[in-house]
């Protein structure tokens, strides 16, 4: 097997594994928080107590979201960059996030990482729609590549929406774009052959 291919596959495996673990941890915290909220009857307590509980849960889950955003910042460019450049990009991203956190705040640093990931993922989506063969995907097939790009875009927008939920109008716009992108992306991934037959002109190879 080609050494470059092996390196890329290993990188993909560890990124997928790390992302799965982080998402699982976030799910556990969220499920625990919901059950405890109901069991302890927090909703019946004074507003200041409810606010304190929500802040405490946010503190618990925040480190996992930080890691998830950094993983997204590394995962997206792996479609565009060769394996040997990913380590340099990952190091640059972590250092840049650290510097911005020190100069401004952790929230600003994470927003910068999200915006960079969003910009790169948008480029990946356009290239996938254009049928570019230079992108690196585990699976072959035009509609699978487009679907995967849409799902990743939806995930980035979902996290960005969490940051900007206080802006009501923007929150609604991001929510519906996230929903449409994720649902459409999963449809293309799961039913790529059916979509190819329906639309025609594209073969899943």
Image (cartoon, rainbow, N blue to C red):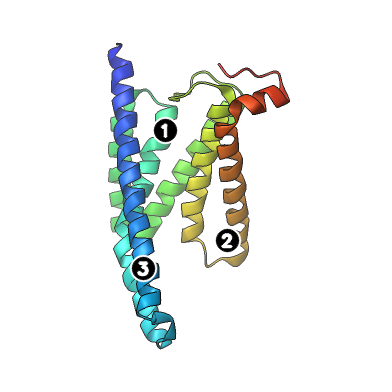
Instruction: Tell me if residue 16 comes above or below residue 127 in the rendering.
Output: below
Q: Name the N-terminal-most of marks 3 and 2.
A: 3
Which quarter of the picture shows residue 146? top right
Label 3 to label 2: alpha-carbon separation: 23 Å
Assign the N terminus to one quadrant of the image.
top left
The residue singled out by tag 2 in the image is 171
Q: Quick one: which residue is furthest to the top in this view?
A: 1
Instruction: Tell me if residue 29 comes above or below residue 159 in the rendering.
Output: below
Label 1 to label 2: alpha-carbon separation: 26 Å
Residue 173 pos. (x, y %):
62, 56
Q: Which mark is residue 195?
A: none
Secondary structure found at label 1: helix
The residue singled out by tag 1 in the image is 77
Q: In front: 99, or 132? A: 132
Classed neighbour count for the residue bearing mark 2: other residues with Cα under 10 Å, few (<14), some (14–19), many (≥20): some
Secondary structure found at label 3: helix
Q: Quick one: which residue is furthest to the bottom in this view?
A: 46
The residue singled out by tag 3 in the image is 33
**For residue 34, side relative to residue 196 (left or right):** left
Q: Name the N-terminal-most of marks 3 and 1.
A: 3
């Amino acid at each position: 097997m080609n050494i470059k291919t092996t390196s890329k596959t290993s990188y993909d495996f560890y990124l997928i594994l790390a992302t799965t673990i982080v998402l699982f941890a976030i799910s556990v915290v969220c499920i625990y928080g919901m059950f405890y909220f109901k069991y302890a009857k927090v909703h019946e307590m004074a507003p200041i107590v409810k606010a304190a509980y929500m802040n405490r849960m946010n503190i618990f889950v925040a480190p996992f979201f930080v890691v998830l955003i950094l993983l997204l910042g590394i995962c997206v460019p792996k479609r565009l960059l060769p394996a040997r450049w990913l380590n340099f990009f990952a190091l640059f991203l972590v250092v840049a996030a650290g510097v911005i956190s020190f100069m401004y705040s952790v929230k600003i640093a994470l927003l910068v990482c999200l915006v960079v990931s969003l910009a790169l993922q948008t480029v990946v989506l356009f290239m996938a729609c254009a049928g570019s063969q230079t992108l690196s995907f585990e699976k072959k097939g035009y509609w699978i590549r487009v679907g995967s790009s849409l799902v990743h875009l939806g995930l980035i927008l979902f996290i960005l929406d969490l940051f900007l939920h206080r802006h009501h109008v923007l929150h609604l716009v991001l929510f519906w774009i996230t929903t449409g992108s994720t649902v459409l992306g999963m449809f293309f991934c799961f039913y790529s052959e059916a979509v190819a037959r329906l639309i025609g002109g594209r073969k899943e190879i």
